[in-house]
Amino acid sequence: MKPIVRIAPDVGWLPVSFANVYFIGRPGGKWVLVDAGPPERASEIVQAAEARFGTGSRPEAILLTHGHADHVGSALHLAEKWDVTIWAHHLELPYLTGKSPYPPADPTVGGAMAFLSRFFPARTTHLGERVRPLPQSKVPGLTGWEWIAAPGHSPGQVAFFRESDRVLLAGDAFATMDLDSWSGLPSGRQQLSRPPSPFTCDWDATRTSLQTLSKLRPHVLGCGHGIPLSDPGLPDRFEEFAVRFRPPRRGRYVREAARTDENGIVGLPPAPFDPVPFVTMGALVLVGIALGAGYFDEKRN
Ligand SMILES: [Zn+2]
Ligand SMILES: [Zn+2]
């Protein structure tokens, strides 16, 4: 079992498959879970939590930074096991209660994750009565923390911030690894980077949110993807990253964002032509013809 790694005295980090979850609280005391990992990973999260907080321990709340499947996949399972409420920004609720799908992924935006996004199944999440909107100016289960709207990657994306030691848990408002790079993706090298590009539906809002978050000058930074960051140069580096931030050059949501409201999708820019499935299909057909013709059959006379 992977142990929870401490990034602040009472904040623990656990990478679950490809997405991070965070635990806030001290052993023996009350605690909350921030994000809930991909589907089918509930037992891994429970085991890690029990190793830190004690057998049978349960959190006060499950807080979501947003509702993409890699952050919410195990949420319902966990909420039912622990009998706790899941909290998310109200603009994220249509995608968590089956009212609306998320704006479709954009595989044409470029980069490693965009290419791979063609093979990710689109999932819809139904948390039913378990999910509730985050209350104004309060974070359920925590004191000393605030939630900050950071839309762009998703309409109701939020970050959680504690001013006393400047810990920022930012979800997918951005990332601490380069998900667009074929070398950055497997290596996981720490780097302030764009949020997961193919799933980001408003790039102008993403930039504005980054500028808002960078002004908090966090000392500890934990995102949904990548190893958390904490070093003396971080606040300045983060501000510079936000100032220099540029959206990708092309992509469905680069010039025009997806329009959404409290009921979900209102309007979408047209889907750009994506040649890759056709090229892949064409290659497979050619391989099929070649196999049929015995082209690869070395024993053929
Ligand atoms: Zn996301
Ligand atoms: Zn994510």
Image (spheres, rainbow, N blue to C red):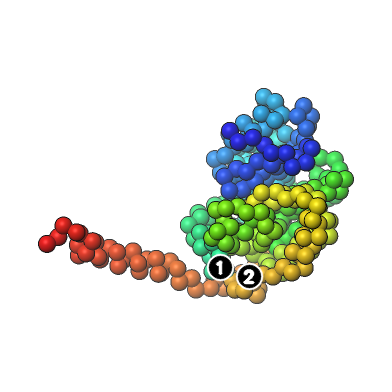
Q: Residue 291 vs residue 239: left or right?
A: left
Would residue 138 be visible to someone looking at this image?
A: no
Q: Residue 248: give its label.
A: 2
Would residue 37 be visible to someone looking at this image?
A: yes
Q: Are marks 2 and 1 in contact (CB under 8 Å)?
A: yes
On screen, residue 53 above or below 237? above
Say whether disc 2 or disc 1 marks the residue closer to the N-terminus: 1
Instruction: Tell me which amino acid carries mark 1.
Output: Gly
Near mark 2 (Cα within 10 A), the count class, few <14, some 14-19 or many ≥20, is: some
**Which residue is nearer to you in this view: 47 or 156?**
47
Residue that label 1 marks: 110
> Residue 275, image x and y in percent?
45, 71
Residue shown at 74% from the left, 69% from the top:
244
Spatial CA distance of label 2 from label 1 is: 8 Å
**Element carrying mark 1:** loop
Q: Quadrant of the C terminus?
A: bottom left
Residue shown at 58% from the left, 33% from the top:
1
